[in-house]
Amino acid sequence: MTDLLFDLAFWLAAPVWLLLVLAPGRRVTDRVAASPLTVVPVLAVYLALALPVLPELWAVVTSPSRAGFQDLLALDAGAGAIWAQVIAWDLLIGQWMYRQGRRLRVHPLVMSPLLVLTILLAPVGLLFFLALRALRTSRDRAAADASAARSTAPRGTP
């Protein structure tokens, strides 16, 4: 049962990821990306896996240690619970990145690879996206400042 739940965590998130990566800008994709409820099925899997190991999980989160974390991961349900948690958080991060990318008008040919990277290595994908977002925001701010300066300059001034 644990193996099934472990796999199910990914397969419940996969349709959302497919929309974000392969159907950007579609109305359904934008609606799905705006909903935090997409993670609820994955969180249900998390609960199914976490409840049987709740004492061990609680011990690790209230008194973190590498050894305690290793002990939790040695339990099938413990590893599955951590996996489901990672899947849920990665999906929320991906949805946020998608919405930010749309707001900043980042081309889908740039966003889709970033989202795939986020599926595989979320911290790396997020870091690249944050760098892109910072560049894009500063560029847009500079363009807005230049436009404002032109519109307030006296006539005849270049």
Image (spheres, helix red, strand yellow):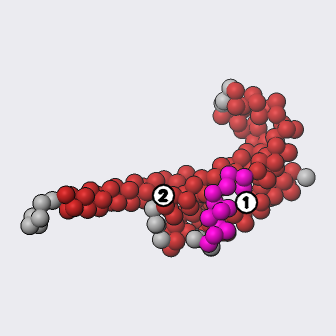
Q: Secondary structure at mark 2?
A: helix
In this view, 45 is above or below 21:
above
How far across and down, in percent of the image, does residue 18 sit?
Answer: 67, 69
Q: Is residue 40 magenta?
A: no
Identity of the residue drawn at 85% across and 45% down: 48
Name the residue carrying label 2.
129
Q: Amino acid at mark 1?
A: Ala
Identity of the residue drawn at 20% across and 62% down: 150
Q: Check if mark 2's residue and mark 1's residue have beta carbons within 8 Å.
A: no
Crowd around label 2: few <14 · some 14–19 · many ≥20 (10 Å):
many
Q: Secondary structure at mark 1?
A: helix
Query: Most extreme residue toward the right, as rendered?
Result: 1
- The secondary structure that dominates the magenta segment is helix
- Look at the image and give the residue range highlighted in magenta: 26-39
Crowd around label 1: few <14 · some 14–19 · many ≥20 (10 Å):
many
In this view, 4 is above or below 60:
below
Labels in figure, total: 2
How far across and down, in percent of the image, does residue 50 sit?
Answer: 81, 40
How far across and down, in percent of the image, does residue 143 sit?
Answer: 29, 61
How far across and down, in percent of the image, does residue 86 sit?
Answer: 68, 49
Identity of the residue drawn at 22% across and 61% down: 151
Q: Is residue 47 left or right of residue 69?
A: right
Viewer-closest of 101 and 143? 143
Instruction: Measure the C-alpha gap from mark 2 to mark 1.
Output: 20 Å
Viewer-closest of 75 and 131? 131
The answer to whether residue 66 shows anywhere in this view is: yes
Q: Which image quarter holds the C terminus?
A: bottom left
Residue 71, label in figure? none
Name the residue carrying label 1.
13
Q: Is residue 10 left or right of residue 133?
A: right
